[in-house]
């Protein structure tokens, strides 16, 4: 463990992502990753040599997963919170992926300052799901900003993706199922045509909680609805075979 100590601050821990032998650095009392980025990465259809941007990268989970699975990807993670951007950089070093992951501290609403002239083949986002007026806001600043739209809403994230993508670039979003109509409407507003959609249910016979959406910039109309994805089998907390395969 001595070789890892310089990567850690006193209030942090190294946790197992249980995914591609990856580790993640997280604040002991701050924002902690969930299954959402794992689902989003598994949903993507990316090719060798692509240049990818992850908007709101947090601790760098999405860049780490993608870089570990597709060797020639070059990935940029954009993160507004300085503490999390720093943690994402150290996470890339921890997993020996720093040569293919670049973390930029910046705000999706101010791309002219942080990413002027940048262009990408695909954009991913696991944005804050809830409006400030929706539910109790976490006391911790990292968790509050990750869960609630305190510094940019879904419109801001989609507008940023539209600016950064190449002419026919791809966009991948994980979002709340209850906000599906608004998401699809805003995607079309920025010429990000929805092309593929999958509903994510906790268990069979339970309502969908999340959605996974793929869009294409300047794409033609035509939406493929994929079979539903179930997270848990039975009434317990055991993952379904499909979810377990995503982690492997």
Image (cartoon, rainbow, N blue to C red):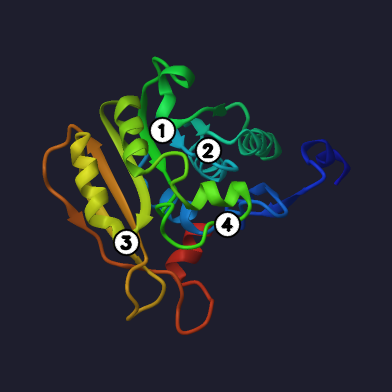
Judge by depth and name the residue closer to the eye, 31 or 117: 31
Q: Badge 3: few (under 14), some or many (20 or more) residues near its Cα, within 10 Å?
A: some
Q: Is mark 2 on a helix, strand or loop?
A: helix
Q: Is there CB contact under 8 Å for labels 1 and 2?
A: no
Q: Badge 1: few (under 14), some or many (20 or more) residues near its Cα, within 10 Å?
A: few
Task: From the image, state whether disc 1 or disc 2 is nearer to you.
Answer: 2
Query: Mark 1 or mark 2: which comes first in sequence?
Result: 1
Compared across the picture, whether 26 is left or right of 72 comes to right
Q: Is mark 3 on a helix, strand or loop?
A: helix
At 25% from the left edge and 42% from the top edge, which residue is drawn? 215
Q: Name the residue under label 2.
A: 67
Query: Mark 3 or mark 4: which comes first in sequence?
Result: 4
Image disc number at residue 177: 3
Which quarter of the figure has residue 116? Answer: top left
Q: Badge 2: few (under 14), some or many (20 or more) residues near its Cα, within 10 Å?
A: many
Judge by depth and name the residue closer to the eye, 124 or 244: 124
- Distance of label 4 from label 1 (alpha carbons): 39 Å
Residue 203 visible:
yes
Percent across and percent down for residue 124 are 40, 40
In the image, residue 148 sits, relative to residue 227, either above or below, namely: above
Percent across and percent down for residue 226 are 25, 60
Which quarter of the figure has residue 120? Answer: top left
Image disc number at residue 138: 4
Task: From the image, state whether disc 3 or disc 4 is nearer to you.
Answer: 4
- Distance of label 2 from label 3 (alpha carbons): 28 Å
Q: What element carries label 4?
A: loop
- Distance of label 3 from label 1 (alpha carbons): 31 Å
Query: Mark 3 or mark 1: which comes first in sequence?
Result: 1
Compared across the picture, whether 163 is left or right of 98 comes to left
């Amino acid at each position: 463990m001595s070789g890892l100590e310089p990567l850690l601050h006193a209030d942090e821990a190294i946790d197992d992502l249980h995914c591609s032998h990856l580790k993640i650095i997280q604040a002991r009392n701050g924002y902690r990753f969930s299954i959402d980025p794992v689902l989003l990465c598994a949903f993507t259809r990316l090719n060798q040599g692509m240049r990818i941007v992850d908007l709101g990268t947090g601790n760098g989970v999405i860049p780490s997963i993608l870089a570990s699975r597709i060797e020639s990807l070059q990935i940029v993670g954009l993160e507004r919170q300085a503490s999390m951007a720093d943690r994402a950089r150290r996470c890339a070093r921890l997993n020996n992926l720093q040569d293919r992951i670049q973390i930029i501290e910046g705000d999706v609403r101010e791309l002219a300052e942080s990413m002027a002239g940048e262009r990408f083949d695909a954009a991913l986002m696991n944005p804050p799901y809830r409006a400030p007026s929706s539910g109790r806001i976490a006391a911790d600043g990292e968790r509050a900003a990750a869960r609630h739209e305190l510094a940019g809403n879904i419109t801001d994230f989609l507008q940023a993706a539209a600016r950064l993508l190449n002419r026919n670039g791809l966009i991948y979003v994980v979002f709340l199922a209850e906000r599906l109509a608004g998401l699809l409407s805003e995607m079309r507003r920025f010429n990000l045509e929805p092309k593929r959609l999958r509903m994510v249910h906790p268990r069979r016979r339970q309502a969908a909680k999340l959605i996974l959406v793929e869009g294409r910039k300047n794409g033609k109309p035509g939406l493929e609805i994929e079979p539903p994805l179930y997270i848990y089998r039975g009434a317990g907390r055991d993952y379904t075979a499909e979810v377990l395969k995503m982690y492997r």
